[in-house]
């Protein structure tokens, strides 16, 4: 559930970008950071290795503005995608309100996409929640690369029942980044007004 | 969902605020933050003489993540928890102590302030704040109307196009 600070009249929502290593999660946040006006966002914090691989997480706070007297804020996080960082991924899922699953269109990453989704399910289950209880949006990224697999083939291994809203993206040039974020934000806020 | 939500209501919020203010006065620290385990600032106080604080959003996120990582380590080592964290630099100290399972009290102060004094006063404040947070667990959930969703939607259009 979102953190609601009633007296200070603040609502805080946590959105996590999940997915295999190198699928473009950090790139999504960098694009949002570069395009949202300075007064509506905070500093971007990246805990990364020297070669720019995410070590723990990236973090970017966004101010939506005031809704019915409540200052509403989103905290965006990415997880480290590499398999061996699972302990960190689990920690970042703590208190999550919405998830963007960033899949990679490269043919040799099809299995990594599937494994990352399975890992997400397992990690959520360890926190005692079913994937269906959290709003999740699927972003199929790197649509521009040569040999990109058909979107539906990628979806088939991640979301075979076609339950998730899907966006195609080219995050390095910003394509699909805002559409994806808007969609997941809307799902999180809708849930808030349904008191779920 | 994963974490219980923590809603600070009017009167409780003011009481927490007062306790933090007292702690600030008694210890001589620069900044005093109550952060929830998800990394959001619940309450913040700073000394009148203190320079502008760094980005509090970032401080809260890093403190909460650090605490989560430390707690995971504690579990691996068979401890229930490591309750406090102390980071000492050349000019100042960051001191973090758990307030039950829900929040973290974070103090930032200069080297001239004795850590022992800070610890003693912090223990007292934590007992007081923990009691208030415990009362709040039984508070009714906040209700939002349909209009909330509409208002939020319009703002999303403004922010994200
Ligand atoms: N061609 C292409 N490259 C991308 C795209 N999105 C991200 N990249 C690149 O993929 C690499 C990994 O991206 P990064 O965001 O660090 O991946 P992360 O591990 O998921 O955080 C970087 O070199 C990005 O510039 C895309 O849509 N198309
Ligand atoms: Mg990354």
Image (cartoon, rainbow, N blue to C red):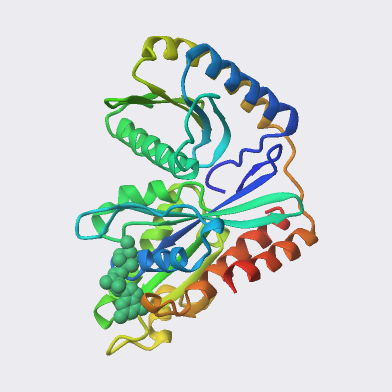
Residue A44 spot, x, y in % from top left: 41, 55
The correct choice, above or below, for B136 with respect to A15 in the image is: above
Q: Nearer the viewer, residue B47 or A90?
A: B47
Give the side of residue A66 with respect to residue A38, left or right: right
| Image: A20 above or below A167 | above
Q: Residue B120: percent from the left, percent from the top?
A: 45, 10
Quarter for ligand 1?
bottom left
Examine the rendering and report whether any part of residue A6 can be seen.
Answer: yes
Of all residues shown, which one is farthest toward the left?
A50
Q: Residue at x 70, y 43 (%)?
A: A9
| Residue A93 position in % (x across, y down) | 44, 51
Q: Quadrant of residue A31?
A: bottom left
Pick whichever, A40 or B96, lies toward us. A40
Residue located 40% across and 62% down the image? A18
Instruction: Give the quadrant of the C terminus of chain B.
Output: bottom right
Q: Position of residue B80 (x, y in %)?
A: 38, 26
Task: Please report the residue visible at 43 percent of the width from the left and 38 percent of the height from the top.
Answer: B64
State the count of labels: 0
Nearer to the camera, B33 or A167: B33
Image side of residue A34 versus residue B91, left or right: right
Asked whether the viewer can see residue A164, the reply is no
The residue at the point 65 percent across, 56 percent down is A65
């Amino acid at each position: 559930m979102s953190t609601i600070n009633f007296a200070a009249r603040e609502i805080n929502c946590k959105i996590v970008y999940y997915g295999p290593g190198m699928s473009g999660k950090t790139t999504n946040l960098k694009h949002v950071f570069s395009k949202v006006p300075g007064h509506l966002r905070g500093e971007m914090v990246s805990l990364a290795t020297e070669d720019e691989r995410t070590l723990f997480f990236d973090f970017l706070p966004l101010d939506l503005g005031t809704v019915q007297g409540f200052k509403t804020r989103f905290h965006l996080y990415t997880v480290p995608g590499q398999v061996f960082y699972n302990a960190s991924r689990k920690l970042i899922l703590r208190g999550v309100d919405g998830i963007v699953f960033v899949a990679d269109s490269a043919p040799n990453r099809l299995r990594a996409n599937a494994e990352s989704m399975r890992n997400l399910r397992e990690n959520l289950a360890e926190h005692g929640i079913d994937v269906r209880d959290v709003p999740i949006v699927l972003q199929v990224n790197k649509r521009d690369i040569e040999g990109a697999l058909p979107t539906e083939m990628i979806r088939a291994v991640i979301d075979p029942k076609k339950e998730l809203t899907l966006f195609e993206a080219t995050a390095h040039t910003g394509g699909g980044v805002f559409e994806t974020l808007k969609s997941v934000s809307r799902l999180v806020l809708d849930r808030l007004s349904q008191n779920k | 969902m994963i974490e219980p939500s923590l809603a600070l209501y009017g009167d409780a919020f003011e009481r927490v605020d007062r306790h933090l203010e007292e702690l600030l006065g008694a210890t001589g620290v620069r900044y005093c933050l109550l952060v929830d385990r998800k990394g959001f600032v619940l309450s913040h106080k700073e000394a009148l003489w203190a320079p502008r604080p760094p980005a509090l959003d970032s401080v809260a996120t890093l403190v909460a993540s650090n605490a989560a990582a430390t707690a995971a380590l504690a579990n691996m080592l068979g401890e229930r928890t490591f309750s406090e964290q102390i980071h000492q630099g050349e000019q100042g100290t960051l001191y973090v102590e758990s307030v039950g399972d829900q929040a973290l009290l974070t103090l930032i102060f200069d080297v001239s302030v004795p850590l022992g004094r800070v610890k003693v006063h912090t223990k007292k404040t934590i007992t007081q704040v923990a009691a208030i947070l415990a009362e709040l667990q039984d508070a009714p959930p906040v209700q939002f109307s349909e209009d909330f969703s509409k208002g939020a939607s319009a703002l999303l259009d403004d922010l994200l196009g």
